[in-house]
Image: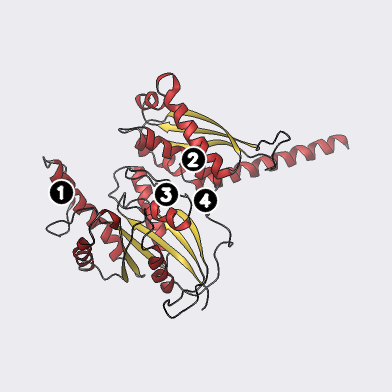
Amino acid sequence: MAFRSGFISIVGRPNAGKSTLLNALLGQKLAIVTHKPQTTRTRIQGVLELPVRKKTKTDTGRPAAQIVLVDTPGVHKPETQLDRRMMQEVHDALESRDVVWFLVDVTHRLPEVRKAQTSEEFAEARKVRTLGQHRKILSKQEDDFALQLVKKLDCPVILVLNKIDALPKSTLLPLIAHWTSLHEFADVIPISAKKREGLELLLDKSTALLPEGQRFFPKDQLTDQPERFLVAELIREKILLLTGEEVPYAAAVIIEKYEEPASLKKTKDGKLPVTKIAAAIYVERTGQKAILIGKQGSMLKQIGSTARKEIESLLGTRVFLELFVKVQEEWRASRGFVEDLDWRRQLEQMAEIQHRNNKLAESRNKTAAEDKG
C-alpha cells in the first residue's frame, strides 16, 4: 500500500471538542482545553504518524500515512477584531486541506424548525426572555453559520458526531438523519474524543481519502508551533481555568523573554537546567488587572505555579517564570494588537530584530578592525 499524506482541518462550533480530539489522537497535550467556549484562538497543527496496518481476514488494513491535523477556533459570527482574526484562522485552515472533519457536539438539542436566520432574527434571539429559549435560538443560528462554511467546500467532509458517551445510543439515528438531510457528507463517524472511542475508524476512513504522497514534516516532529507559543497558551489556559466572568476573554499572553539553557545536561548537583521565561498578560481594564493579580498577588502566583509545572513537563527543564499584568484598553478591537498576537508575526518580528542586531554587530566589528589597522 502506497504511503499517504495530507491535511485534515477540524472545524465546528465552539466547545464541540476539537482540541480534545486533537490531543487524543496525538497522545499528548498540544492544544489547551477548558470548559469555556472560544478557548482556541489560532489554528494549531499537529503531525500524526500512522504505521502501516497489514490486511487480514478480519481487517481491511491501512496504509502508512502522515496526517497533519489542523485544529481551529470555534466557528462563530465575529463581533470584535479578535473574533474576525479567529474566523480568518478558520478560513485559512480550509484553504489548504485534503479532508475536513465537521465536528458536532451531540449534546446540543436539535431545533424543531430548520431555516436560515437573518441577522435581525439573531438579534431578536438576544431579547428572548427565558434562558432555554435564548440558548435554543442561538444554538440554531450557530449551527446554520457553521454549516454554511462546510457547504462551500469542494473536498470530502466527514461528519464527526462527538461526545456520544453522554447520550443513549438510540438518539444517534435521529441525529444522523438530521445532519445528513442538510448536507451530503463523505461519511458519518460517531466518536467520543474524551474516551477515545471511534478514533481508529475515523482515521481509517480519513486515510482512505488522502492522496498518495510524501511526508510534509520529519517523522518525529509533533507540531509546527514554536515552544514559546505553546508556553504562552499554557499560561492562558490557567487564566481561563482559574478566573471567571469577562477576564479570560479579555486576556492575551505575550512571551517577552525566553532564554533557553546552553545545555540540556543536568548540573553537577544533579538538577535539570533552567529555562528563563517572562510573560506579559494583557487585559483591557484596571479592574481586570486587579482580579488577575488577586489579593497580595495570590491569583497571579497561582496562575504562575500551575502553569510552570506543565511548562516544565513540556520543555524537560526547570522553569523560572515571571508574570506581569498590563492594561491595553480595548485591545480586542485593535487590529494591530490582535495581529501582533499571532505567533507567525512574532517570529517574523524576532527575525527582523535579530537581522538588525547582526548587521549592527558586523558594522561594529568592521569599524573596530579598521581602527586597529
The type of residue carrying mark 4 is Gln
The type of residue carrying mark 1 is Glu
Whether residues under marks 1 and 4 lie with C-beta atoms below 8 angstroms apart, the answer is no
3D distance between C-alphas at marks 3 and 2? 12 Å
Q: Quadrant of residue 38?
A: top left
Residue 331 seen? no
Whether residues under marks 4 and 3 lie with C-beta atoms below 8 angstroms apart, the answer is no
Quarter containing the C terminus: top right
Residue ranking furthest to the front: 57
Q: Which comes sooner in the sequence, label 4 or label 3?
A: 3
Q: Write down the residue under mark 2.
A: 232
Residue found 15% across the figure and 49% down from its top: 120
Residue found 47% across the figure and 46% down from its top: 342
Secondary structure found at label 4: loop
Label drawn at residue 225:
4
Residue found 49% across the figure and 37% down from its top: 254
Q: Which comes sooner in the sequence, label 3 or label 1?
A: 3
Secondary structure found at label 2: helix
3D distance between C-alphas at marks 3 and 1? 29 Å
Q: Write down the residue under mark 3.
A: 42
Q: Quadrant of residue 114?
A: bottom left
- Pointer 1: residues within 10 angstroms few (<14), some, or many (20+)? few
Q: Write down the residue under mark 1.
A: 120
3D distance between C-alphas at marks 2 and 1? 38 Å
